[in-house]
Image (cartoon, helix red, strand yellow):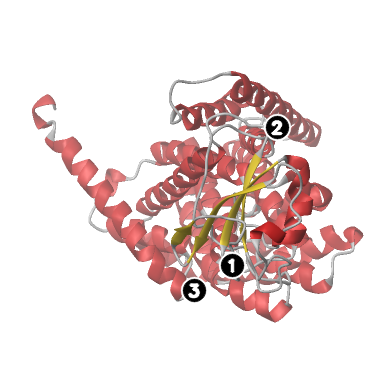
Amino acid sequence: MIASEPLTTGWLLTIAGLLMLASVLFSRPSERIGFPAVLLFLGIGLVASLWLPADFADHSLAFRIGTVGLVLILFDGGLNTSWRAARPHLAPAAVLATAGVAGTAAVVAVAARVLGLEWPEALLIGAIVSSTDAAAVFSALRGSNVQLRQRVGATLELESGLNDPMAVILTITLTGVLLDTGNFSWASFIVDIVVQLAVGLAAGLAIGWMGQQLLQRVRVPAAGLYPAMTLSLALLAFGIPTLFLGSGFLAVYVAALMLGNRRLPYRAGILRVHDALAWLGQITMFLVLGLLAIPGLLAASGLMGIALGLVLALLARPLVVALCLLPFRYERAETAFIAWTGLRGAVPILLASYPVMSGVDGALELFHLVFFIVVFNAVIPGATIRWAVNRLRVERAGQPRPTPVLEITATEALPVRVLSFLIDPAAVVAGSRVADLPMPDGADILLLVRDGRILPVRGSTMLESGDHVHLLIAPEQIHAVSLLFGLREED
């Protein structure tokens, strides 16, 4: 064994590098033709599995890798979620993440029973595919190049970030029933749900608050250590509540939500690192789960997988979403889009590995059935997001937010803000001299970028449409300056 090193490690790293490189290189063409990137990653892993030995699949290792990947994705999603925008839509998202998950599981379970599965297996399949996938939803919404209405986008992102705990609880409980490890009790089942959610929420709030204090008060010797600190908080947010029978996934999302909505030192750098980690986690998770699939068993699950995929996309999800959102007075088009965009991804496949690890009879066949449902769901409705946006007209009015041409970061939280604006032809300042601008006291233009060139800013400088202007202002001046300069870039 020792003599085979470092050749074995070299082969493993070479294969891993080639698979990840292929995923990255093919992601852009897949986006252009509307092919979901997550399905591409799964497909590459599935093709690679054809050349691997039959005993290569390790569901325990894949479960751990997938868990880490999901933690990174949820943490990144929480960091980029605006609490001010999301707060009004927390109630409907919470209903979808709890009652919606249970309702979807029930409808799919009935369909699976009609198709020939016994009730325990049917209920387990329903539980596994009941939650939307944070990786798939975040990727689809941010990669679709559309500006959704605020409550539609916020509801979808909050739901996908909050609904994993319910699916995990259902899956673990039903796996125990299949193993006949004890008598099922509705009372203990409900208590488990309440305890896991309560412990996860409390841990997320506590670790989020602790993280805020650390980032505000601790000064590290290098800027690159700030992302290391936030990564450690993400791992703690999952690990600690899990040790106390709480939901680590909920805690991760809540902690990240708290951190992302406070002023952070080196904020742009932290967000950039976690965005990269989330993509790395997503690619790795889908590749590894794709390697677990056995083509023969996957093909054998085809007919039932298509049938259950259709039930999930066309019946279970729309019915449950319509009922859950009815009290909140969403427009029909908004409800229809939220129902259609209930994407599944790596989480159901990850959950399907749990019965396999637990030794449930027939679990491997169930795993491949779930795999096929996820693949089918990635195409319908996954590949039709832009079509649905245009068809249902749920796009937000106005131009999409421009991409910043310059990022200015600071390793300490300063009492001022550096904001960037793209000057639109309709902006008040378009065609005005800098000296004539009614700027608030203390506000100043730091930099002007025009056609890729940096120009000196003088009183006689004329601002033109398409200019990127970077301003130094106090936080209380943001509203007044926004009225003058118009569309703000990501900062």
At mark 1, the secondary structure is helix
Which of the two discs, 3 and 2, sits closer to the camera?
3
Which residue appears farthest toward the top when viewing the image?
218
Closer to us: 461 or 239: 461
Which disc is residue 34 wearing? Answer: 3
Q: Amino acid at mark 2?
A: Asn
Which of the two discs, 1 and 2, sits closer to the camera?
1
Q: Amino acid at mark 3?
A: Gly
Is any atom of residue 389 visible in this view?
yes
Question: Between disc 3 and disc 2, whose residue precedes?
Answer: 3
Which disc is residue 410 wearing? Answer: none
Left or right: 188 in relation to 22? right
Decide: few, some or many residues near mark 2? Use Cα within 10 Å; few <14, some 14-19, many ≥20. Answer: few
| Residue topped by disc 1 | 309
Decide: few, some or many residues near mark 3? Use Cα within 10 Å; few <14, some 14-19, many ≥20. Answer: some
Q: Position of residue 487 (x, y in %)?
A: 67, 62
| Residue topped by disc 2 | 183
Q: Residue at x 72, y 64 (%)?
A: 338
